[in-house]
Image: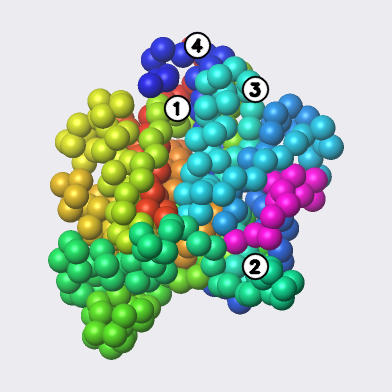
């Protein structure tokens, strides 16, 4: 483990600023904007908000899951107007891509490879290219998604896998619907209180997340039919919507953060783990257990932390909470992807953006501030296609000299 406690100020990584676009429904306000355009808008806003000299950025690292190849990070950086000297790297760990990008930036700072990175993720499901395999005769065989596991092992679609999780871990329809309702209620309340205001950047006429619904009721939720498996419990109501979006964060060294009189999240460690692809939704339980073993975070400590967990499906959220022995109400106090939306490659970066905003609010900073004790630790968690999980742990701190 490379913890902040055994790092020098030059190799301690800190997330000091974040910006994201309001999340849009696929086919909605961003339908004419490609992924790099979404990323560029977020990058411009981040640079403006942080005051960082663009020429000092060592790299731009973005996650992306449904693109057609190339290097969306480099294209986004140039479209944002960053100097040509600033390179770009695109990473793909599917739903965990945005969090992986943030972790990679932190690792590079820990290694002494640089001291300032823009990291995050972007997804445009609306403009994702059609994909096809080329057959031996040269014909094209189009497919909706990439293969993530050997067919002999099992490579279910995400919705089918969510049903597998619900069945395997005995997660009832009632629990799923109740959790989804709570996520929407939290997101609606957070938006009304202005708690997303400092992190979101209006784009393409959209000034607020499009997904949260104030009109959902238990009766309405009960009317949704099974969406993926006949007679199943996973519905459109307790699943996340397909979404477009982007989120980027400024990751720098403690030394530079002090020079900028910044506050932020100190990176402690991260862990990635694999699990049965047929139960892909619970991968985050395995990665979080590994992370806790690495950092010494106890179950009680996790329960007292700020925790953001990507809500692809209510079934997986509840199963992971059960496996970790925590109350699912611990997750996503301002609502999660069930309400806000899930732009695959960006969602992991959205989690860290939310952690930073929540910590700052408790510290009495930012919109909707409610000063109170800031939990010592903050944890972001994502379960991923192919049966994997990624978790990252941070610690709030102020870096003002004197």
Q: Is residue 147 left or right of residue 152?
A: right
How far, Cα to Cα, is label 2 from label 1? 43 Å
Between disc 3 and disc 1, the foreground one is 3
Q: In the image, is residue 72 part of the stretch drawn in magenta?
A: yes
Q: Is residue 74 left or right of residue 190?
A: right
Which mark, by number, is residue 266? 1
What x and y, as percent, mark residue 305?
A: 28, 38
What residue appears at the point 30 percent right and 59 percent down from the top-left corner?
279
Q: Which residue is mark 4?
A: 8
Which mark, by number, is residue 114? 3
How far, Cα to Cα, is label 1 from label 4? 12 Å
User: What range of the chain is rendered magenta?
Assistant: 66-79
Mark 3 Cα shell of 10 Å, populated few (<14), some (14-19), many (≥20): many
Q: Are marks 1 and 4 in contact (CB under 8 Å)?
A: no
Does 92 sit above or below residue 264? below
What x and y, as percent, mark residue 365?
A: 45, 38
Q: Which residue is mark 2?
A: 133
Q: Are marks 2 and 3 in contact (CB under 8 Å)?
A: no
Residue 386 seen in render = yes
Q: Are marks 4 and 3 in contact (CB under 8 Å)?
A: no
**In the figure, residue 111 lies in which quadrant?**
top right
């Amino acid at each position: 483990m490379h913890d902040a406690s055994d790092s020098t100020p030059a190799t301690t990584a800190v997330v000091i600023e974040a910006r994201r676009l309001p999340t849009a429904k696929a086919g909605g306000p961003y339908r004419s904007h490609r992924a790099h355009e979404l990323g560029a808008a977020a990058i411009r806003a981040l640079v403006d908000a942080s005051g960082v000299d663009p020429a000092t950025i060592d790299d731009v690292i973005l996650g992306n899951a449904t693109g057609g190849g190339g290097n969306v990070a480099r294209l986004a950086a140039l479209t944002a107007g960053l100097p040509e000297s600033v390179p770009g790297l695109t990473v793909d760990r599917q739903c965990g891509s945005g969090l992986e990008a943030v972790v990679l930036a932190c690792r590079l700072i820990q290694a002494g490879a640089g001291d300032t990175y823009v990291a995050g993720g972007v997804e445009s499901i609306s403009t994702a290219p059609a994909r096809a395999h080329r057959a031996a005769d040269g014909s094209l065989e189009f497919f909706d998604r990439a293969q993530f596991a050997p067919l002999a092992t099992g490579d279910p679609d995400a919705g089918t896998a969510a049903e597998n999780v619900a069945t395997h871990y005995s997660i009832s329809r009632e629990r799923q619907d109740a959790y989804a309702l709570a996520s929407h209620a939290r997101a609606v309340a957070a938006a009304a209180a202005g708690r997303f205001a400092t992190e979101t950047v209006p784009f393409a006429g959209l000034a607020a997340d499009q997904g949260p619904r104030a009109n959902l009721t238990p009766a309405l939720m009960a009317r949704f039919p099974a969406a993926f498996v006949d007679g199943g419990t996973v519905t459109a109501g307790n699943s996340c919507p397909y979404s477009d979006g982007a989120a980027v964060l400024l990751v720098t060294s403690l030394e530079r953060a002090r020079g900028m009189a910044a506050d932020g999240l100190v990176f402690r460690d991260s862990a990635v783990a694999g699990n049965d692809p047929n139960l892909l939704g619970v991968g985050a339980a395995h990665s979080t257990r590994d992370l806790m073993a690495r950092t010494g975070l106890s179950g009680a400590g996790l329960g007292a932390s700020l925790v953001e967990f990507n809500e692809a499906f209510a079934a997986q959220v509840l199963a992971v909470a059960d496996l970790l022995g925590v109350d699912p109400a611990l997750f996503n106090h301002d609502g999660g992807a069930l309400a806000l939306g899930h732009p695959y490659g960006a969602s992991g970066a959205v989690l860290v953006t939310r952690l930073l905003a929540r910590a700052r609010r408790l510290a009495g900073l930012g919109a909707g501030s409610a000063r109170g004790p800031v939990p010592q630790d903050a944890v972001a968690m994502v379960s991923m296609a192919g049966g994997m999980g990624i978790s990252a742990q941070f610690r709030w701190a102020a870096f003002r000299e004197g």
